[in-house]
Image (cartoon, grey):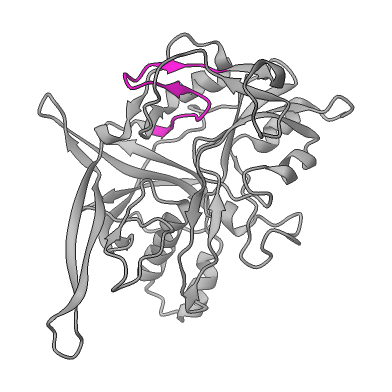
Amino acid sequence: MYSLQINAADTLFFRDGRPFNMGEDTYAQGIFPPPPSVLYGALRTAYMAADTTGQPLSALITATGALTIHNLFLKSDKDILYAPLPADLFVDKDGNITFPELKKEKEVPVSSIPTPQMLYHNTNGKPDGQPRLVTLEILKDYLDNGNQQPTFKNVPLKDFTEKETKLGIARSNATRTSDEGMLYRMEMVRLEKQQEDKTWQSLSFWVQYDGIILPTETWVRIGGDKKATYINSCQLSIENLLPRPTLQSNQFKIYLATPALFEAGWYPENLLAKHDLELIAAAVGKPLHLGGFDMVKRGPKPMLKAVPAGSVYYVQLKSDSKKDINAIAQDIHGKTISEFDSKYSFKGIPENKLPDSARQGFGAAFIGNI
C-alpha cells in the first residue's frame, strides 16, 4: 500500500447535503472533514490529469476504478496523525473526558433505543458539542484498554482550523452584470491557525491507498469552490500505530474512523449477522447527509444517510456461535465495512466484491476492548 498527503493551498469548501438553489438560498453551510468520496474523486482526477499516454477518457476512468482507500486521517505539520474523538466518550466544556458505563435498560431512563444495554456517563457536566480529535497514539490506548483509562488527551478541531465566510453574487451571462437576488455566502475553512505562542499549526489529509500508482507530486482542485491542493507522497504508516488489540473477552467495540453507509441505516445488521454478533449498545452521532453530482449520468446522486465518523458499536459474540472471536476481529480491524454500492445499491452485492463506498474509504473500522 501507498500513502500520500493532500495539502491545502487556500481555504477549502465542502458543502453538506442541504439544498442550495441559486436565487432561493443565500447561505451554503460547509462541513469538515469532508466525506471520503471527495478525496477519492480528487485522487482519480489527479491520476487522469497526469496521464501522458494519450489514452481516451473512458480508459482512464476504468483504470482509476481500481483505486481503493484503506485509511484516511488528518495530519498535522508535525507529522502527527489525528482521528475523530470516539463518540462513546463524554466531553464537557473544559475538555474533560468521562468514560461510559454499560447499564441495563432498567437502570437508566426510558429510551427507544433497541439494545439491551445503554451507555451511561456519571457526570453533571454540560457537553462541549464541538468536534474534537485524538492522536493515533491515544486512540491505540483507547482500543487496547477500553473504558479503564483515567485520563484521555484530546484537542478541539478549531485549534487547527479557521472558518472564513466568502460573499459572492451571480452574474448574468448576457450582460455580465450582477443578477438581482443572487447574493450568497459560503462557509470556507482554512486548515491553518496561529496559536497563542505565535506559532502556526496546520492540517492536511493523510491517505493510505492501493490499486493504482499516483504521481508523487502534483496539484489538483478539490471541493465545492475548486480550490487548489498539493499532493505529495508521505512515508508515515499506521501498521505499528494501530495494531489489532488482544481481546479480553467475547465482547468488544467497533470504532469508525470514517463515515459508513449501512443498509439498515445506523444499525450494522449485515455485519452482525455475518459474524454471529449481537449489538449491546451504541454511540452514534447525527446522520451525515451525502449527495453529490454524478458526472456520468449528468444528474444528482441519491441522498444517503451515513453513520458519522467517531461512532462506536459495542458488540458481543452470540452464545451459541462456534466462531473464533479473534478471527472475527481480524476480519474487521483495519478494514472498510461500508455496504453501499452504486451498481447494486445495498442488495445483491457479490460476496467477493468490495462495495463502492468501502473502496472510497467509507467505514474504516478498528476493534477495541470494552
- Can you tell which quarter of the image residue 125 is in? top left
Q: Is residue 318 left or right of residue 34?
A: right
Q: Main secondary structure of the magenta part?
A: loop
Q: Is residue 88 left or right of residue 112?
A: left
Image point (47%, 33%), residue name: 238
Which of the pair 175/60 is nearer the observer?
175
In this view, 122 is above or below 57:
above
- Where residue 323 sits in the image (x, y, percent)? 83, 30
Which of the pair 161/124 is nearer the observer?
124
In this view, 22 is above or below 312:
below
Q: Which residues are magenta?
A: 82-100
Instruction: State the quadrant of the C terminus.
Output: top right
- Where residue 312 sits in the image (x, y, percent)? 57, 32
Which of the pair 5/262 is nearer the observer?
262
Q: Residue furthest front?
A: 110
- Can you tell which quarter of the image residue 364 is in? top right
Image point (48%, 27%), residue name: 241
Can residue 227 be seen in this snapshot?
yes
Q: Is residue 149 left or right of residue 224?
A: right
The answer to if 94 sits in the magenta stretch is yes
Q: Residue furthest bottom?
A: 174
Q: Is residue 27 left or right of residue 292?
A: left
The answer to if 342 sits in the magenta stretch is no
In this view, 14 is above or below 334:
below
Image point (63%, 61%), residue name: 341
- Where residue 258 sits in the image (x, y, percent)? 50, 43
- Where residue 63 sits in the image (x, y, percent)? 53, 68
Q: Residue furthest left?
A: 198
Can residue 359 be seen in this snapshot?
no
